[in-house]
Amino acid sequence: MSPIYHVRKAHLNEVGDLPAIERRAAQLFADRLETLGLTIEGLDQVNEVDDLARAIAAGRLWVAETVHRELVGFALVLDFGEYAHLDELSVVPEHGQQGVGSALLHQVCAWATAAGYQAVTLRTFRDVPWNAPFYQRRGFAIIDSAELTPQHVELAAIERGRGLRSDLRVAMVYPITPI
């Protein structure tokens, strides 16, 4: 990552800024709506501020900022028992491909290792270049959600209920210890 960015734990007073980052990052999908089962309205669905605040209190939310303290990305992790589940990794498009996403992901994996999790998991689109291929280049592997937990299976069902094409979505795992 470029030295102009810094990754750190999020602060409570920043929680209101994160939905805008998530919406801006979601705009990268605007030209793929129909093929991915997305809608314009769906791109505007973001994590609730209260959920983000709870993640901050639990130490499961990181931000990336510029040297000018402008927030340009964040990573949100959910606790799924033995798995740290990366629920959201968003970077604003104008700061994309600068190593920000990689740095956030590295921080999440390092934290999960130190916290004693068995693995980091996530759900993403299989064929979108900044989704599954990005994670595969960083050591994640595709796995059947049923091999993980009921929470992972439920996430897949929620996605289907939102109209996402489940045939284009995958669960991925970054093992910290053997599964």
Image (cartoon, helix red, strand yellow):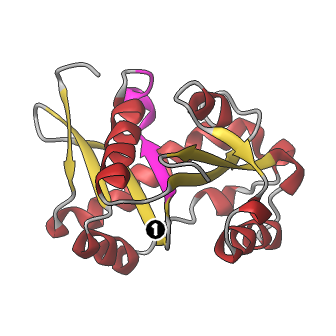
Note whether 134 is above or below 148 in the view shown. above
Note whether 30 is above or below 81 in the view shown. above
User: How far across and down, in percent of the image, does residue 17 sit?
Assistant: 28, 59
Secondary structure at badge 1 equals strand
Q: Residue furthest left?
A: 68
Can residue 96 be found in the magenta stretch?
yes
- Residue lying at 36% horizontally and 37% vertically, measured from the top left: 106
| Residue highlighted by disc 1 | 78
Note whether 7 is above or below 45 in the view shown. above
Number of marks in the image?
Answer: 1
The quadrant of the picture occupied by the N terminus is top left
Give the quadrant of residue 58: bottom left
- Residue lying at 66% horizontally and 28% vertically, measured from the top left: 133
Can residue 162 be found in the magenta stretch?
no
Give the quadrant of residue 67: top left
- Residue lying at 43% horizontally and 75% vertically, measured from the top left: 48
User: How far across and down, in percent of the image, does residue 64 sit?
Assistant: 26, 41
Q: Indicate the amino acid at tag 1.
A: Leu
Give the magenta range: 85-97
- Residue lying at 31% horizontally and 60% vertically, measured from the top left: 115
- Circle 1 packing at 10 Å, graded few (<14), some (14-19), many (20+), is some
Residue closer to the observer: 22 or 3: 3
User: How far across and down, in percent of the image, does residue 21 sit?
Assistant: 39, 50
Q: As drawn, is 148 to the left or to the right of 122? A: right
Residue 25 visible? The answer is yes
Q: As drawn, is 41 to the left or to the right of 25? A: right
Q: Residue furthest right?
A: 167
Q: As drawn, is 115 to the left or to the right of 12? A: right
Residue 73 visible? The answer is no
Q: Residue furthest front?
A: 178
User: How far across and down, in percent of the image, does residue 99 sit?
Assistant: 37, 24
Q: As drawn, is 80 to the left or to the right of 145? A: left
